[in-house]
DNA sequence: CTGGGGACGGGGCCC
DNA sequence: CGGGCCCCGTCCCCA
């Protein structure tokens, strides 16, 4: 038995502090992903509370909890409990909630919470009846509960669904939450009807998360909800489990496992409903006010003070400032891609626009930074190594050094950007291409039409990529790529196929996919005539033509020449017999505008068939004599 | 078992 | 910043 503390309130104060820090994201060193919700917390706290979580946090900073065992909303409650020791002020009817929490707490091995739930259930006289009464899955918090957990996204349906669960017994994972995603759509539909959440949108409007740019899907296709895809039950391990039980976040294995050809649409099998089903039900019942939710969201978005890419974030901000011509090196941190896309204008004060005031001085930036709550003031408490130019503190000299190095890179960059790219001035040496694309990369000689694109390109040469993913830390050269990457983290697929409900993260994928339904196969193999709906499949197919079993280039000259001749003939409107002749006569080849137009694909094709790089192929094709650099081709073409 | 095709996810990058 | 395209890789199915 521990001796009583000399300061009895010590533990409470400590916990209050920790919870306060958690809600601000301060010193949070682990992210818990539960389906499509993300939580930040402290490893130490989790490890001290849950045997199960303890086993996970030692290995990873990003934990993906099995949402079949614990739903996001239940985990929110549990996390609140861990940090407050309270289950909240639940309604009298919340025995159902306690049941669900109990099941999840058992799974997470939080013994105190298990005991508390049992106690509450017994007090309500429900504990003995839970097996038959069943627990709902409380997609949202109990209405009487006050949540403090910052959550980036909560897209859940709270309609209770009777399920069979027996506390204290091994919990069927589905029982903990299966109503959450697949329960009655009534509430979600209501939201839709009230315009709070478009039916095709995946995310909670409360959270302001909307990465969708298009809403092409039909509203809640009934055949999606009929559970027709019985593969799902295999995946979920339970015959009555609803479709879509598989994770929609990053659980690709289950995604793959549950997806199946939609060709069967015309037959007996339902379309891959699991892709859209979770989204359709992703209607938040979060009771938090919109503002409150946004605040939590923003808290979540705040950078972790000690993450090693913080310096690059600063750098990113400088880049943005550079791009936008504004001074705000500290106004931007890695943010979730949807934030700006769906945030009302009045929220922009916490976003990019905040930094648009003109004072670029470090102190002003720092102050603005603080005002924006992007950094907690206390974060400087142990960040004793301060960068003089920008005032930022770091906990170690190593991190400061890394940061300073980033400054050096910035300076190099700014030095470059001080001298904005200028078009070539030497008209005498300009080719047509130079006139059209006058901005040349100093590193690789690639040319661009405008300086912004050149600047964008030049980032690809940097050793350090300026846009890190806030979740996994992966870095990107373009912010857009990073936000697109974030979509995959969040499982957001805004683009839905009208025909089958399949959803995609990108418009282009949907376009590509639609060819399956239309039967269109615009990509034809010039060698064998095979047609493909997707260009990438043609490309991989072409490799089959050009690559031998050993992986080495298979230079089948008869095939290649035939193909090139056919290709040329197609493009020039000539007979195929003439094509080879033309291929060997550069002057003819380059005199026809049509030919020039076809040079690019021809070069591509040549490259693929001859194992040359495309650039090399283009060079070969544009030089005289044509194909002169490859003796094998000359030999082939010069033969009768 | 293997190769090929179909379909899709993710990243790079230009516009 | 988003759209679009390219490329690489993967999974699944089927012959």
Image (spheres, coloured by chain):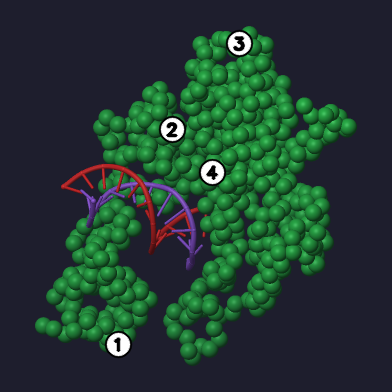
Chain colours: A green, B purple, C red
Q: Residue at x 53, y 78 (%)?
A: A443
**Farthest residue, direction left:** A640
In front of the other: label 3 or label 4? 3
Cα gap from disc 1 to disc 3, whole angstroms: 89 Å
Q: Residue at x 72, y 26 (%)?
A: A86
In front of the other: label 1 or label 4? 4
Residue that numbered label 1 is attached to: A624
Cα gap from disc 1 to disc 2, whole angstroms: 60 Å
Cα gap from disc 3 to disc 4, whole angstroms: 37 Å
Residue that numbered label 4 is attached to: A490
**Residue A83 visible, this orientation:** yes
**Label 1 with label 3: CB-CB less than 8 Å:** no
User: Which one is earlier in the sequence, the residue at label 1 or at label 3?
Assistant: 3
The quarter of the rendered structure image containing the N terminus of chain A is: top right
Q: Residue at x 44, y 84 (%)?
A: A431
Chain assignment, label 4: A
Residue that numbered label 2 is attached to: A244
Q: How many marks?
A: 4
Residue that numbered label 3 is attached to: A126
Chain assignment, label 3: A
Labels 1, 2: one chain: yes
């Amino acid at each position: 038995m521990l001796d009583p503390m000399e300061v009895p309130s010590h533990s409470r104060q400590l916990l209050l502090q920790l919870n306060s820090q958690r809600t601000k994201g301060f010193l949070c060193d682990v992210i818990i992903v539960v389906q499509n919700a993300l939580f930040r917390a402290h490893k130490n706290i989790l490890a001290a509370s849950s045997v199960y979580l303890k086993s996970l946090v030692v290995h990873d900073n990003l934990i993906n909890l099995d949402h079949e065992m614990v739903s996001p909303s239940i985990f929110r409650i549990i996390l609140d409990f861990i940090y407050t020791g309270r289950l909240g002020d639940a309604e009298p009817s919340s025995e159902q909630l306690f049941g669900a929490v109990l099941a999840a707490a058992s799974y997470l091995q939080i013994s105190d919470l298990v005991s508390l739930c049992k106690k509450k259930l017994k007090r309500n006289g429900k504990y003995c009846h839970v097996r038959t009464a069943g627990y709902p899955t409380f997609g949202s918090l109990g209405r009487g509960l006050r949540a403090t957990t910052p959550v980036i996204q909560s897209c859940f349906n709270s309609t209770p669904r009777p399920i069979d669960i027996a506390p204290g017994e091994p919990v069927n994972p589905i029982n903990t939450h299966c109503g959450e995603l697949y329960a009655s759509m009534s509430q979600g539909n209501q939201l839709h009807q009230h315009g709070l959440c478009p039916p095709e949108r995946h995310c909670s409007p409360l959270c302001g998360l909307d990465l969708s740019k298009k809403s092409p899907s039909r509203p809640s296709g009934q055949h999606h909800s009929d559970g027709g895809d019985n593969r799902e039950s295999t995946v979920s391990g339970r015959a009555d489990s609803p479709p879509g039980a598989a994770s929609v976040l990053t659980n690709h294995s289950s995604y793959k496992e549950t997806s199946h050809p939609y060709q069967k649409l015309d037959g007996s099998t339902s379309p891959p409903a699991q892709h859209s089903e979770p989204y359709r039900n992703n209607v938040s019942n979060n009771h938090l006010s919109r503002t409150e939710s946004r605040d939590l969201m923003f808290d979540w978005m705040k950078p972790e003070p000690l993450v090693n890419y913080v310096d690059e974030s600063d750098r990113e901000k400088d880049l943005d400032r550079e791009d936008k011509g504004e001074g705000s090196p500290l106004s931007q941190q890695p943010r979730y891609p949807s934030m700006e896309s769906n945030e009302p204008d009045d929220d922009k004060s916490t976003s990019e626009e905040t930094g648009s005031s003109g004072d670029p001085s470090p102190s002003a930036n720092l102050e603005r930074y603080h005002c924006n709550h992007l950094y907690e003031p206390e974060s400087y408490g142990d960040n004793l190594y301060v960068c003089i130019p920008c005032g930022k503190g770091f906990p170690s000299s190593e991190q400061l050094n890394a940061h300073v190095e980033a400054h050096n890179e910035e300076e190099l960059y700014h030095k470059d950007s001080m001298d904005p790219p200028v078009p070539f001035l030497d008209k005498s040496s300009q080719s047509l291409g130079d006139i059209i694309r006058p901005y040349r990369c100093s590193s690789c000689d690639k040319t661009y039409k405008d300086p912004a694109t050149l600047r964008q390109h030049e980032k690809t040469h940097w050793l350090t990529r300026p846009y890190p993913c806030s979740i996994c830390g992966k870095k990107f050269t373009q912010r857009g790529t990073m936000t697109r990457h974030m979509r995959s983290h969040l499982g957001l697929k805004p683009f839905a196929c009208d025909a089958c409900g399949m959803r995609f993260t990108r418009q282009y994928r949907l376009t590509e996919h639609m060819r399956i339904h239309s039967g269109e196969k615009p990509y034809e193999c010039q060698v064998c005539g095979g047609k493909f709906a997707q260009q990438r499949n043609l490309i991989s197919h072409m490799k089959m033509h050009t690559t031998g079993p050993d992986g080495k280039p298979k230079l089948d000259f008869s095939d290649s020449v035939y193909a090139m001749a056919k290709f040329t003939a197609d493009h020039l409107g000539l007979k195929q017999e003439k094509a080879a002749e033309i291929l060997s006569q550069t002057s003819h080849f380059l005199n026809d505008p049509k030919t020039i137009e076809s040079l690019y694909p021809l070069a591509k094709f040549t490259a693929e068939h001859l194992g040359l790089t495309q650039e090399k192929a283009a060079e070969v094709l544009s030089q005289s004599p044509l194909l002169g650099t490859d003796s094998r081709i000359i030999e082939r073409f010069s033969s009768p």
